[in-house]
Amino acid sequence: MKRHVLMVVATVTALLFSSLTFAQATDNESAAALEKARAELAAVEKVVAEQTVAAKDAEAKLREARRHLLAEEAWAARQAAASAEESKAIANQALASKTAQLKAAQEKVAAAMKAAELATAEKAAAEKALEAVPEAETEKRAEATKVLEQKTADAKKADEAVAAANQATEKSAAEKVAAEASAAEKSAALTKALDTAALAHAAAIGGLKPITSDQWDYAKARHLLFRAGFGGSPEEVQKLVDMGPHRAVDYLVQYHQHTPASIEPDRDIYSWERPLAYESQLHLEAQNRLTQVDGKRNVDQHASMVRWWVRRLLESPRPLEEKLVLFWHDHFASSYRTLGEAHLMYQQNELFRRYADNFDALLHGIVQDPAMIRYLNNDDNVQGNNNENFGRELLELFSLGEENCAAHEQDGYTEVDVRDGNTRSLTGAGYEHYSAQYRFEHGKHDASPKTLLGKTGNWGTHEAVDIMLEHPATARYVTKKLWQYFVYWEPEPEVLDQLSSLLRENEYRIRPLLENIFLSEQFYSDKAMASHIKSPVELLVGTAKALKLPKVDYQNVRFLLASMGQSLFDPPSVAGWADGRDWINTNLLMARYTATADMVKKEKTDFVALLKNDKFNDSGEVVDHFARRCLSTNLSPEKRQSLIDFLGPLPPSSEWAKQTKEINAKLTALLVLLVSSPEYQVS
């Protein structure tokens, strides 16, 4: 249609120019002919415009129809998967019933055989008793004969009972085999239905193509558990393997369905106490002593707060929740060292946890978060005396991203947006020191019109946030950071396009985005697996989880994290921590080796007890077990052999209990080498 219209336009345009040329060349051309040519061109232009609008309208309707079809296909696939799951559950119940029936039948066989053996023995005894009665004692022989006849009948009846029980057992066994086949068939049907549903769901939301169940294995389950959390023991990984990819991702992402961690700080974290009225009248030394008491309490609260969060990172039944809290702590970075107020940081940490999977709520929450307001000096941002810190970082680091300023992007934000639109919109947003509550003071707010990202109006704080959320660069920036955190550093442009649209269309809910990412082919690609350099938190928490360390010294972990450059609640700047290779520079690499080795040695774990359910015949099997338990990459043959040689000969694990101390010493030394290796630095 478009091609035909363009040809008509070209033809008419040619005719027009021909007419004009002729008009200029001859004085006899009438003005009417010129006007007619113009009218013809205008008519065609009108037709083209109408057809263009119609074509665009048709394309929009086609897109909408496709979206509707994909939505219905996704829903139908979900319903089919639910039906398949119900069928599998029924088949499993039938299998459990048939298994119980077979067990009962087998027990009846055993009881019948025991009764038959007893009846046979009694018959034999009756036969002997009859033989022992002399022929002359006819009365006694008659009585003994009668007993023998009864015992013979009992034995026959018992044999018949055994035969009947065996027949029933054979029938039950056959029914169990049939039930097993049905359960296997329903399980395969469910797996296929889940794969189909995942593919249809990804198409409906415009996401990435998911992997299929037959691609799922231990390595991928381990990769998922570490990236969506902090890793785990082989038993925890195997649990995800058994779930399959769809249920495993659902289990981690739908963390609100799990019981929250009931972990509280070992002391109350509360705000500053308002001084009593008379205390301001005390002499200077008394006031200083009160200040020192408050200061010490605040320092103690900070230490308690770090220990509390480390424990949550390690013990929470919602690992993805804590992983997201750590991400947002880095994204919306503020520091206790700068604030000097533990309660504000604690309150902010809980904000990140409350809205961990909702960026819309987080961005609205952060603009009235007392910790961030104070950290970025917005309590000094008042009408007529603006402070740009919060307004600038809100655009550069928290929403659109520095890469989307006008210097880099045509439709990016400008200095005018920072100074005029954002900063002035935030005026009056402060907090009350002693209660640590957000307070908006209307008298300090600039109520005049402002222009932000091309929109002009009397914007307040939350209106400004809404404008930022509406800008497509925000979804793209947040999506890119999430991809870098969970997958790999450089997402392909088309991947970023798909996922940022997914995030925007779902109003910045993080769960649908992560669900699609964690099932995607890209997430399990060679580019993603074993490519992420662990942060210090991931390194130490992952070590404790993989080795199931029974008693973690949280205070020690606090100091170890600081030695590696990641003090919790203390990012180095508003830009957060540097990532990737910055964690393994020459200054920090030795600290990482020392910290992980210190954790392994300090806990004095009984590895003999830890491995009591495993069987090892030699040192090679032990090295292979710990390599699989701890590493995302395979050891080279040379390194594997060097670890075997270091470990030295070991007796079979069945004999370890006889020399627990010696075996534990060897295993601890082996693990120190393993967690200090370059291979252990990545996941």
Image (cartoon, rainbow, N blue to C red):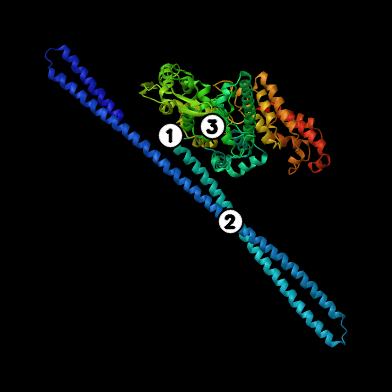
Q: For mark 3, what is the residue?
A: 352
Q: Is residue 683 visible?
A: no
Q: Nearer the viewer, residue 576 or 277?
A: 277
How much space separates mark 2 and mark 3, taking CA atoms? 42 Å
Which element type, helix, strand or loop, lies under badge 1? Answer: helix
Image coordinates for residue 407, horizontal then vertical, percent? 45, 16
Q: Nearer the viewer, residue 630 or 575?
A: 575
Image coordinates for residue 591, horizontal then vertical, percent? 69, 23
Which element type, helix, strand or loop, lies under badge 3? Answer: helix
Q: Amino acid at mark 3?
A: Phe
Q: Quadrant of the N terminus?
A: top left
- Disc 2 crowd rating (10 Å Cα; few below 14, some 14-19, many 20+) is some
How much space separates mark 3 and mark 1, taking CA atoms? 22 Å
Circles 3 and 1: CB atoms closer than 8 Å: no
Residue 93's label in the rendered image is 2
Q: For mark 1, what is the residue?
A: 505
Q: Amino acid at mark 2?
A: Gln
Q: Is residue 449 left or right of residue 147?
A: left
Tell which circle, 3 or 1, labels the residue nearer the N-terminal end.
Answer: 3
Tell which circle, 2 or 3, labels the residue nearer the N-terminal end.
Answer: 2
Name the residue: 21% across, 20% down: 15
Circles 2 and 3: CB atoms closer than 8 Å: no
The number of numbered badges drawn on the structure is: 3
Residue 303's label in the rendered image is none
